Image (tube, grey):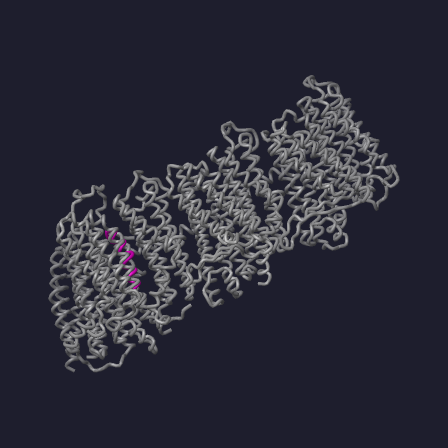
Amino acid sequence: MASLVAFSFLAALVLGAGLGVVLTRNVAYAALFLLVTLVAVAGIFILALAEFLALVQVLIYGGAIVIVVIFALMLTRIEEFSRVRDNPQKPLAVVAALAILGVLTAAFLQFRPAVATLRGASLEGLGKELFTRWAIPFEVASLVLLVALLGAFLIARTGVDRDRDRDRDGDAPPEGGGR
Amino acid sequence: MPGVNFNLLWPQLLVTALAFAVFGADLLMRRPQRALLVWISAAGLVGIFVFTLVYLWGRNTTLYDGIFHIDNFSLFFSAFFLVIAVVVVLSSAQYVRQYLTHPGEYYGILLFSIVGMMLMAAAGELLTAYVALELLSFSLYILASYARNEPKSNEAGIKYVLLGAFSSALLLYGISLIYGAVGATRFQDIALALRGMEGVNSLLVVGIALVLAGLGFKVAAVPFHMWAPDVYEGAPMPVTAYIAVGSKVAAFALLLRLFAEGFAPAIDQWRLLVAALAALTMTTGNLVALTQTNIKRLLAYSSIAHVGYLLMGLAALSPLASTGLMLYLVGYAVTNMLVFVCAIAFYNREGKDEISALSGLAGRSPFLAGAMAAALFSLAGLPFFAGFTVKFYLFSATAKAGLLWLAGIAITNSLISLYYYLMVIKQMYINPASQPTPLRLPWPMVALLSVLVLGVLFVGIYPRPVVDAIQAATQAIFPGGMLSTP
Amino acid sequence: MDTFDRYVLLLLTALPFFGGLALVLFPSSRPVLIRAFTLLITTVTLGLSAYVFLSYDRSRGGFQMVQQFAWLPSIGASLHLGVDGISAALTLLNGIVAFAGTLVSWKLAQRPKDFFVLFLLLVSGVYGTFASLDLLFFFFFYELAVLPMYLLIGVWGSSTDFRTFLRTKEYSALKLMLYLVAGSVLVWVALLAMWVDGGDALGRSSFGFLDLQSAHYSANFQKLFFPFLMVGFGVLAGLWPFHTWSPDGHVAAPTAVSMLHAGVLMKLGAYGILRIGMQLLPEGAAAWAPVLIGLGTVNVIYGAVSAIAQRDLKYVIAYSSVSHMGYVLMGLGTLDAAGINGATLQMFSHGIMTALFFAMAGVIYDRAHVRDISVFEGLAKRMPVTVGAFTVAGLASLGLPGLSGFVAEFMVFVGTFRTYPILGALAVIGAALTAVYILRLVAKAFFGPLDDRWRGLTDASRLEMGAAAVLIAFLALWGLYPWYIMKVIDSGVAPIVQRLASG
Amino acid sequence: MELAWLIPAMSAIAFPAILLPGRLLPRGGAFLAPLAILGGFIVFWIVLADFLATGNAGFGITWLEAGAVRLSWGIFIDPLAVIMLGVVTFVAMLIQVYSWAYMANEPRFSWYFAVHSLFAAAMLTLVLADNLLFLYIAWELVGLCSYLLIGFYFERRSAAEAAKKAFVTTRIGDVGMLIGILLLFRATGTFDISTLIHLAQTGGIAGGALTAGMLLIFAGAAGKSAQFPFHVWLPDAMEGPTPVSALIHAATMVVAGVYLVARLFPAFEAAPAVMAVVAAIGLVTMLLGATLALVMTDLKRVLAYSTISHLGFMMLALGSFGLGAAIFHMFVHAFSKAMLFLSAGSVSHGTNELDIRKLGGLRRRMPATALCFTVGALALAGLPPLSGFFSKDELLAAVLQGRGGVFLAFTLLGAFLSALYMSRVTLLTFFGPLKREQEHAHESPLLMIGPMLILAVLAVVVGFLALPLVSGYGGFGHVLEPGGEPFHFKVWLVTLSSILAAAGLTLGWLIYSRGALSADAVRARFPAVQRVLESKYYVDVIYQWAIDHVVLVAGRFVALFDRVVVNDTGVNGAGASVVASGMRLRIHVTGLLANYALGIAVGAVAVAVVMWLMTTA
Amino acid sequence: MTLLMMELLSGALFAIGLYGVLARRNAVLVLMAIELMLNAVNINLIGYAAFLDPGRVLGQVLAIFVITIAAAEAGLALAIILRVYRNRGTVNVDEINLMKW
């Protein structure tokens, strides 16, 4: 019962903050709402006996993502900062969101598997699994992170690439800038 | 670790190692030496290609309870990706030399994406497939926005990455639903669940649908396709080639294994849907392509149309259709690489990617015009180029699966496509050149083009070795001919 | 010679193909070498096709000089070559027209290398189509024969300005290409359907013509898919109302291409209807024959009436082709031995005749640089040989006895009168209309006092005369002595008629 | 008898022989043509002798075989064929001899003789053919040769037009003929003439098919024989060299139609309705030709209309079941008309003028020509005892017997007119004072006069062949119709026709020589008649109108339809609509990321819904 | 707390995120919305792992991967957005439409 109350509270928080993310007109508020959502989701994880995941959630999202998001917000257009507008297809967006919600809800309601009692995974089991059976995907995921970091660095760094006049082969300088 | 044989992942490991080597070399080398990196990358890839074929030939095993498959199917695609990578690396050479200070970064990321593609073809499980797919996708996001100071490249990057993330979310949600419905994510578990399914498992159905949508985005199937023209147009030309060829082949490798090993038992539920998507995709792609003036955008819509044809092979899922689909991938890849390399060669000289800029090319460079014409005729499906043979095979297989109407739509579509391919050929051969100076190509380009032209002709005239190899690969994903064999 | 016999068809198809590819390596700066090489190839292929025609054993019948190479066993496709009486005759036709076409293209100055490469590829495609006993390769060569047309017309063709409107070569080339490929869309669908259905019946996949011949398609299947073939191939045969690519295309094309296209390529369409449509789907053919023969009649009359009003020399010829292909279609639609024989001979004789027409029109256009009939007057004075040859072609086209056109048309009439006398009568009237437009043209452009503008014209060169002589020789040969060729053709037609009768 | 095929073959071979290797021989090898026809004439006598000994004969070889259709090339010899062989070879030979001199200065001398040979060959083949198909082939070749010869002076616009007109007009008739042949073939499965006749006589052909077939075949005959309404080409055919006219009018071409009807006579008899048509057309043609001959001013045109008129006589006779009469008239007419044309040629050779208003008194300069012409004219006018008299009387008798009084009256009118226009043209040309322009007129060389004289003699004497001169010979007509009665005069008819002929001649003399009656006054009296006649009954005008306003308009309409409806609307429209739909469709790629995402979302929902529905279904 | 509740929560959050992606103009906000969707995925995964999966582990493993890759994705996307901002001075996706049709 307590869990139900806690879940209701957290679910309300998740959804409320989630709506805040997508509805608020202030970018900073949106970032804050996102933070709230993420933390609330972490709470849900705890309720679902996935403490490790909750930890990961708070650390990675709460830490990394939100900071990066805020960092990016700093760089965006100041005059829009507090008064972002949504694009004109908002009504259609509502319809689409409701449609997907309807489909999902219908699916959830229609398919009712035999539910076991709530049980968490041991951290030990999780770690073992992750580093044995999922070792390869894990390594690949690290490659993904590497590529993402590298890419972020490559794309975001300032400075220009080699000037055209330094072409070694003396080809006629093409127009169009090398798309 | 029990039952694990890392040795079988040597190709992936080697490509990764090559990528790191290229990164490192770039940092250590002085600028003029960096021009060697293209050769290092290409030679390394060729070496790995040979090694892979020799080392893995005929192996048929799975790793980690079916997370990975080392079989003829994955071997075929590994070799395929390596060949694509060699061509893309070689065709990027001039672009890299002209615009980039650190070629190692470019080639390194390219090589990482190859690892992702190879893993996609080998993955027997949704999460692994997803991770491998993201490795490929991230590399492509980066490559697409590589021309950092070009607004169009930026635009391509932002559209690609945001929509890619969005579609990933759909895909992941689908995976989560499948996990919920089946309790596992391996393809064969899904197949097992589908076969044992009584009544409607809505969770599974919606899950599959979302997975389909997510992967549909990756292959640019209508209505998940709209990013493609913008990204093609915005990305640097060699990257466009890579996106058009590599990512599509990889995505279809994944789709084919997923459908054959996972979704096949529910074929009656999705066959018409996939068929409809195929029809919609090819028709939309071709009709919109009719109105294009930019060669990259034209090829973007054309490749959307080709995705439509490829989806037919999926809809007609059978060993024959899968052979047809893979043969089509081969033909599509070699032809599209040819047309892109032609466009790259032209762009390197002229810096233009408008179709009208090609006017009078036949007089300026008969070789380039001839190669391009061969590629375009092949794309249109005319004989004795690859396009004819692979289309004939795939359409036959589709008809065999009882989808003659779909084959009919496809054939009609290839007629429509002929129109815009002819428009390009008309520019090259019939319209006069605005500046009739001869256009000379560097010899590596000529060599590359020659090889590709020969490839297009080879597949078109003597496809049997390729088909034999593909049939061996097909057997791996259709164990014992799960579906009725014609 | 048995070994030679087995490889002659392959040789015939491969020689122009690889000759064309080899020509790519020739230096563009040596046009004489290029022409001589092309002429060598077409001469040898003419010899080979004559060999095929003459050594075809008409008493034995059936498919001869058969050779088979596996290609894609998984879908049952193989390179399977062989000829029967019908294709043997048409092979000869291709040899003749290609040879004559080379002769009249001798003076082509613009990028001759590229031209002859494409020309030889076209020739190869036609040989391949006539020799194929495998539906996939039939289709392969069929498309291959269409493929070079676009460039041949687009690059070397000519635009026609009618003052009120313009027909550019680009437009004509594009229309021709799209139209023919549109036709092959239907063909392709039907082929796939036949492959699937035939594969089910046979228990194995096969594109082999002989295999599918023994697969018994249901009547409904045949009735459903015969029109696909009829219209699909009909497009190439100029079937009304899908004919409009033909006048514009023929007019825009350079001389040799017009010759080959109107002379041989259009026959591929009729040949396809006969070989694949009627022979494999006889019940479908029986059900749709009234439509075919009816449209053929429309072709005859419509083409002839249109030709009357044309001002451009080549348009007259082009519409006459539409009209004459109508006889072929009518003949096929009779489902009668005489009619089909006539249709086949008409393919042959129209091929020769129209090649002669276009060759001579080309000579005139080459000298005068206009084709408007109304500006010509009295050309016969300056160009007696050209005009004479043109007139011979005209006489053949209006069905003058003694030239092969008469025999062919007469057989078609006989066949048609047996089945649809009213249509037969209309077809005969079409022949009279032919006389009207041909004689009007001859009287206006060639006869009468010589206009001063044309005082400087020169007659056909020796090579052009040679081409004309070869063509006229065959017109007269089959006109006076049709017995031999009719025997050969009949050996191919007889089994088809038998199938039609029993199916 | 088997040698008969040599007769056309020799001339046929002469054609390529002159054209190809002939160019190496003196005079372009033209002499091969007269040699060939001379050979033919000699063989004719052999054949005749054989024929008299053995009677009808025929044989053939297979030409073509396809399926069940078997066509053979065969010859058939009966009295009709033999007569025609003789006439054709003989007249053609004389005309070739004449041409040798007449055409001496022409640039295309050997071409002329080559085609001449082919013409003769075609006509002879036509005569010998034992089946309708080969008859038709020869028939068409005859048309071709006439086309080539009429268009001999192709540099003249009028000659080019005349040639075209001749070919097209006869071709229209030929279409009918071919359809008729094919109808008969459909009904009987054979082209063989004897078989067809046998079937027709025994009722082996359904009445409708027979009537239709014979009527259509008659259309062909009418075309070649210049019967109304196909007669228009013949007067224009004068554009050819004059010997050609002689050939066309006497021995070949125009008699082909008569010959065709005669050849199929029993079959025609089996279709009485067609016979009535034949007679009526013949009558109309006869009167039309005669009246127009009366007003023409060109010497050759007068002769042309006279030919039309006489062809009408022949058809009329055939239509009146008078086979013998018709053929005899043709026989007689051949000699007279050939000679008249040759004389006209001689006139033109001597004066370069053929307008009879500018000629006159030529007998002073060209006595031999004048003599010949006069004889011929009198013969055709039917003055006893010249040949025309006999044939005309036989003909009148046949008409009376076959068609009765009304037809006879008109026929007599025609005979009268015939005499009248003949006297007109003869008197105006050769008699009266010599016009000043013609001072330099001169007689033609012997090579031309010779053939004319031979023909003149024949024109005088052949009439007597009508009479049963010796036992076993029942007169000309009896040879052709062995079952019929031998020829005999009906005295009242003979008298009447002779009086009419004499009246015609006299009237002509009064008007054109004495000036006792003014032709102008007559003209002024009946202006409408005058106009109608000078407009040639408006037939040409109507045709021209039909060509301009029906055929050409239809052609233009169809061509326009083809371009605007079929091509620009149907073809381009379809293409354009595809491109247009592409244009419309492409706006969905808006460039806006949000729209793209919406597309993906909607697509995902749609895929999910559809799949779910398909699962439950 | 039941599985259905978790599922519905996940579904609702997914729909909210989807709405955000479709409705927002600011690229950063779009990215945030995508993060919401990924969180919805994770709720689902954890829920199924907790209530259904006998091994209990797979869902959590999946979720870890999702979080990892989502983080990387966010970083990369932000870098690209930053680049766009530098070159174009805007992050409004409605204004980034040089290429269309």
* Image quadrant where residue B134 sits: bottom left
The answer to whether residue D291 of the structure is visible from this angle is no
- Work out which quarter of the rendered image holds the N terminus of chain D and state it: top right
Magenta stretch mostly in which secondary structure? helix
**Relative image position of residue B80 (x, y in whole percent):** 29, 59
Q: Nearest the camera: D185 or D577?
A: D185
Q: Is C57 positioned to the left or the right of B162 in the image?
A: right
Q: Answer above or below: position of D526 versus C339.
A: above
**Relative image position of residue B475 (x, y in whole percent):** 35, 68
Q: Nearest the camera: B399 or C16?
A: C16
Q: Is C209 positioned to the left or the right of D365 in the image?
A: left
Q: Is residue B248 magenta?
A: yes
Q: Give the range drawn in magenta.
A: B235-253
* Residue at x 49%, y 44% (from the top left corner): C44
Q: Nearest the camera: B179 or C147?
A: C147
The answer to whether residue C389 of the structure is visible from this angle is yes
* Image quadrant where residue A12 sits: bottom left
